Amino acid sequence: MGIGLSEAFGAAWGTFPAVGAAAPPVTGRDPLSPPGAGQCRHGHMVRLLGRSRAQSTRRPHGQREQGRDDGARRVPHGSAADGQGPRWRPLGGLRTALSGRSVAGQVFLLQVVIVLVLVVSAVVALVLQVRHDSTKEAKNRSLAVAETFANAPGTREALSSSDPTAVLQPRAEAARIQSGVDFIVVMNTDGIRYTHPKPDRIGKQFVGTLEPALKGESFTEEITGTLGPLVQAVVPVKDPDGKVVGLVSAGITTEKVGGVAEQQLPLVLAAAAAALALATAGTALVSKRLLRQTHGLGPSEMTRMYEHHDAVLHAVREGVMIVGGGGRLLLANDEAHRLLDLPGNAEGQDVSALGLETPMADLLASGRIANDEVHLVGDRLLAVNQRPTDLQGEPTGSVATLRDSTELRALSGRAESARGRLKLLYDAGVGVGTSLDVTRTAEELAEVAVPRFADFVTVDLAPAALSGEEPEAVTTLRRTALSGIRKDAPLYKVGEKIDLVASSPQALSIESGHSILETDLSRSPGWQAQDLERSAQVVEYGIHSLIAVPLRVGPLVMGVATFWRSQKPEPFDQEELALAEELVARAAVSIDNARRYTREHTMAVTLQRSLLPRSLPEQSALEVAYRYLPAQAGVGGDWFDVLPLSGSRVAVVVGDVVGHGLHAAATMGRLRTAVHNFSALDLPPDDILGLLDELVSRIDQDEAEDGSAPITGATCLYAIYDPVSRCCTVARAGHPPLAVARPDGRVDFPDVPAGPPLGLGGLPFETAELDLAEGSRLVLYTDGLVEDRGRDIDAGLELLRTALTGADTSPQGTCRAVLDALPPSRASDDIALIVARTRALDAGRVVDWEVPAEPAAVGRSRADATRKLTEWGLDDLVFTTELILSELVTNAIRYGSGPIRVRLIHDRNLICEVTDSSHTSPHLRYAATTDEGGRGLYLIAQLTQRWGTRYSPTGKTIWTEQTLP
């Protein structure tokens, strides 16, 4: 059992750390930096002047030998000229720092003493801290060992055995040796020892305090025991009921605790010595730098130098100012106070609080480099030079010098005035004439001159110039533009009519073609005669001078521009008169350009409107609505038309001519006229486009000889709708596709072959036939609707599809919906939009039959026609219709070939058609009195409203139309 208990104690106590283990590191305080040396109020100036490149290398007499041996003598390696300054020998600088006679030496000695005191204090504090930590560690270890032994298995049973010493002494010694403590004593509640490192002391009284342990508390204490001064812990041993049945004490002698501290003492002293050496070296380096910055000067030398520099600073005839990095004025000499009118307590204040002009205050506060910058301060013109100081360890400041250059003020003022005039002319060149609108150009002239040149500017133009014409006699003007520094000037308002008096400056300038200068309006009877009451109000308002300049381009005078002055007391002078003439001359060219554009635009618009349809023809095949939106600038060549054809058919055409202006409008008119003529031939759409293509090619050839721009690239879409068959035949020449909105809501773009634009010549065009339900909407348009600079045509077509899907089914509603969805706010191209809703002719109003190629069939055809006309209630047209059919059917039988068909259509007119397979063309003849034939077509032409022939791939059809009764 004893062996098992020993092994158990060994396992439990094997984890005890040794008393001699390294103590936790003790953190000491960092050495304190030595305080900086004090500075006088002008210390900044001394350092700045000491670092200046203009520093003199000469010294006062006798100063070279004072406080300096041969080793500390300076050796110049640079000069003020090269900007490097004097350099020092390293050994000499260090000896001078150690001499203690210079400022740097005194600072060095003071810093060494402070560092030494701090290092010694740190060593003492570190030793005491180590000793304290070692004692605390000994107490904690003793308490841990005592508690572990007291609570170890078998300790309580051994205390109640007959011979506790025999059981506990070996265990205590084994645990003491393993844990590293100096003793483990087990005793009874009376303090009689059962164990002790020295066996002769077993059975004797324990030395120390027992009362807290007898109460069940564990504690530690420092006493002098049988082993000498020591640190011990006493721990009670309790039975299961909590009753104290014995005590265990473990401890470590003070000699061993102190030994731990003594073992670390050499390391502490070595660290202290290293810190002292490092601090001394750092102090020496700092002192060496201070020595270099002060140039080895002593206090008396620095005082003498300050007095010399202070005398020079206040005797110089230029203002000198030193500003700190925070914008605070550090120093200003007497001349600076005089030039800037600074208060007596200016030093120490922020430069922005000194009442300086804003540009001057900003320059001083910024610290930026300035070279002879001119600033107006009061009535003085100062040239300012400024350089940053770049002081190490402090915010960057600046040194500024001020030189009075008031004598340059007049010259500078004239230069500034010339610069302002050039800037005004430049701005007028850029800002006047930005549009081709006469009124806006006049407004730009007035706006650019206020307030830089005049306080008020008025522009009066002849009414003819406003409408684009060339005015002849300019006696009546209209106020076109007015700009001023105030809105309540008693001048004529914009839009008022002005009848000029011959003696007024404006009338005189228009009459002579030269500018008129009035320096004093209160003494100008000619100007006052224009309007006595208004003239008095103008003078009372404060306007005292004017310049009237005619708006003239060559011999053409369009009006007059007047410049008025009220704010400046000086009147206009001759230099300003020349400037006004230059300004108006430039603006007059822009106004004339706008006038010419206005005339051309008006003519083009008039021509275009005269060429576009004024009303749509009456027909039953289509319900048509249209919109035409001209471009914001210029007149385009977009056009459209609706043309009734034979057989109740209707042609819808839309086209676009390249370009804008009169040329485009005139070309558009030629193409529209051509389409009218070609449509009268009843040709299919592809033939119509072929003829137009030839026409455009001829036009291009003719205009190329005259040097005019070609129109190649014109586009066109031509569609023919037949309400009887509900078939639409379409062909296009480079034009955007047709859109079809079905009655069921579907919208598609039929695949109509896209032929080349008109004018390329020789290329064929193809047609597509569309079967349309009644109520379908055909949407024809020009490219301006679906395409602009910010949107490609595919995106425009999708927007058109969306607009048609949800639009009102009426043509008018469809036009509104499309234009709301697609056109931009400022269209750059014309927009033509046509919406045609299809109608179908009732089957009961159409009848056709085939006629045999025999003479007897003529009579049967007349009978069939008579019955149908009677059924339709057209008895009044029976006789005429019988005559027409007899002539047409007889001609078809005699001169044509079968099959022969007859068709009657009851629409707005009665239409009679006879079709055969022959392609021979009938000719209207004027038969002589003795001729037996040749009068048939003549009779038809006399009896019908109109007649004609149309051809198809299978033959021809002769048709007639009679007006319904």
Image (cartoon, rainbow, N blue to C red):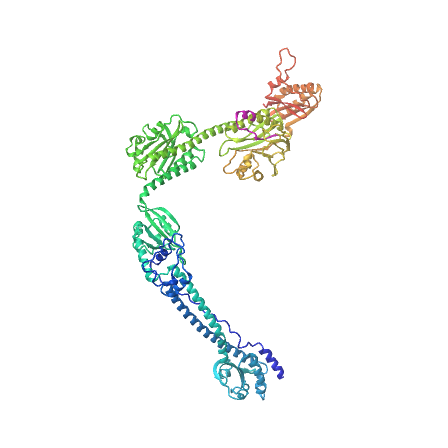
Looking at the image, residue 950 sits to the left or right of residue 330; the answer is right
- Residue in front for this viewpoint, 810 or 791: 791
Looking at the image, residue 550 sits to the left or right of residue 788; the answer is left
Residue 323: image x %, image y %? 36, 54
Q: Quadrant of the C terminus?
A: top right
Q: How many numbered callouts? A: 0
Residue 416: image x %, image y %? 36, 41
Q: Is residue 804 visible?
A: no
Residue 590 position by quadrant: top left
Vertical arrangement, residue 795 with respect to residue 232, above or below: above
Q: Quadrant of the N terminus?
A: bottom right
Residue 304: image x %, image y %? 31, 59
Residue 50: image x %, image y %? 36, 56
- Residue in front for this viewpoint, 711 or 581: 581
Vertical arrangement, residue 339 with respect to residue 24, above or below: above
What is the magenta range? 700-720
Vertical arrangement, residue 843 with respect to residue 117, above or below: above
The stretch drawn in magenta includes residue 710: yes
- Residue in front for this viewpoint, 632 or 95: 95
The stretch drawn in magenta includes residue 527: no
The outermost residue toward the front is 70
Q: Residue at x 45, y 33 (%)?
A: 436
The outermost residue toward the top is 930
Q: Is residue 565 visible?
A: yes
Residue 567 position by quadrant: top left
Looking at the image, residue 199 sits to the left or right of residue 374; the answer is right
Residue 683 position by quadrant: top right
- Residue in front for this viewpoint, 840 or 370: 370
